[in-house]
Image: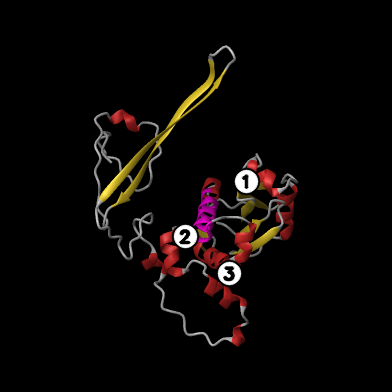
Amino acid sequence: MIHSVYITDSQGEPIIEKHYRGTVHRSELDHFASTRPALPAAILAAAPPAGPPVAISAHSALAHVFRGGLYLVAATREGCKEMCPATVVAFLHGVADLFEDYFGELNEHAIKDNFVTVYEILDEVLDYGFPLTTDPNALKRLIPPPSIFRRVVSSLPTDSLETPPPPSLPNFSSALSRAPWRISDPSPKYAQNEIFVDIIERVSAVILPSGHPLVQGVAGEVVVDCRLSGMPEVTLEFSRGDVLENVGLHRCVRRSKEGGGGG
C-alpha cells in the first residue's frame, strides 16, 4: 500500500504532501531529492530526467513520475509487498492526468493556485493507502472543478461567512461507473448518432548519407470520436483478423473470444 504522496518541484522540494498510513520521515524525501539532477524546470521539461521510476532509500521505496516540471512521488515502507511498483507508477500517472483534467494544465502554479482541490482529490483517490479510482467522471460528482467563486470562498476566513449547508453529494460507490470513460449521469444525448474514426500513421526513420535506412519503424493509432446517445454497444468486424495483432486497446473494447476481428 501507499503510505504517503508528495508533489515536489523539479528540485525535489515538497509543495504538497498527504499521508495515509503514518508519516514517512522527511529524510526519505530528502534522499530522493538528492538523486535528482540540479537543472532548471524548463530544461527538465524538455528532456525529462532518465533513470528508474523507483528510488530506494533507507526505509522506503519512492515511486515517482515527472510531469509538467513536477515530481509526483508515492512512498511505501520497506518490505511492503501488497502492491506492484508498476501499479504505483500507473496510479501516479492517473493522478497527473486528473490534475490536467481539473486545472487544464499541470505545473507548479496550477497546484499552488488550487491546493484545496488538490487535497480533496488526494483524499478520494486512495482508501487507506490503496488506490481507489482516478476516474474524472466519478470524482467530479464529488469534487466540483475549481471556479473563481470557490477560490474566493476558500481564501476567506471561516468566521467571516455564513455558508449554507453543502448540497448532498452521492456516496462514492454510487459515483463509480461500470464505464468510467463515459459520462453516465446524466447519460449523454446527441441530436444525431454518429461515429468519427481517424486513422493516424507515423513513419520514423534514420537515413544514412548513402540513402540507405539505418533505423525505420511504423506506428499508428485509430482515434474514435463516439457521439452515440445512451450506453449502446457497437460491434466492429474486420475482414482480416490479423490487423489486431500487437495492439493496445482502450479498456472500452472487448475482443471476441473467437480471436477474429470483432470488438
Height in image: 258 above or below 193? above
Height in image: 243 above or below 197? above
Residue pictured at 57% horizontal, 64% vertical: 118
Q: Amino acid at mark 2?
A: Leu
Which disc is residue 116 wearing?
A: 3
Q: Amino acid at mark 1?
A: Val
Residue 145 is a magenta residue: no
Per the image, label 3 sits on a secondary structure element best described as helix
Q: Which residues are magenta?
A: 90-104
**Quadrant showing the C terminus:** top left
Q: Which residue is mark 1?
A: 54
Check disc 3: other Cα within 10 Å, few if <14, some if 14-19, many if 20+.
Answer: some
Separation of marks 2 and 1 at Cα, in angstroms: 21 Å
Q: Is residue 225 left or right of residue 193?
A: right
Separation of marks 1 and 3 at Cα, in angstroms: 28 Å
Question: Where is residue 160 drawn, in percent x and y?
Answer: 60, 87
The first of marks 1 and 3 along the sequence is: 1
Q: Which residue is mark 2?
A: 132
Check disc 1: other Cα within 10 Å, few if <14, some if 14-19, many if 20+.
Answer: some
Question: Where is residue 182 drawn, in percent x and y?
Answer: 35, 56
Report whether residue 24 is seen. Answer: no
Per the image, label 1 sits on a secondary structure element best described as strand
Residue pictured at 28% horizontal, 30% vertical: 241
The first of marks 2 and 3 along the sequence is: 3
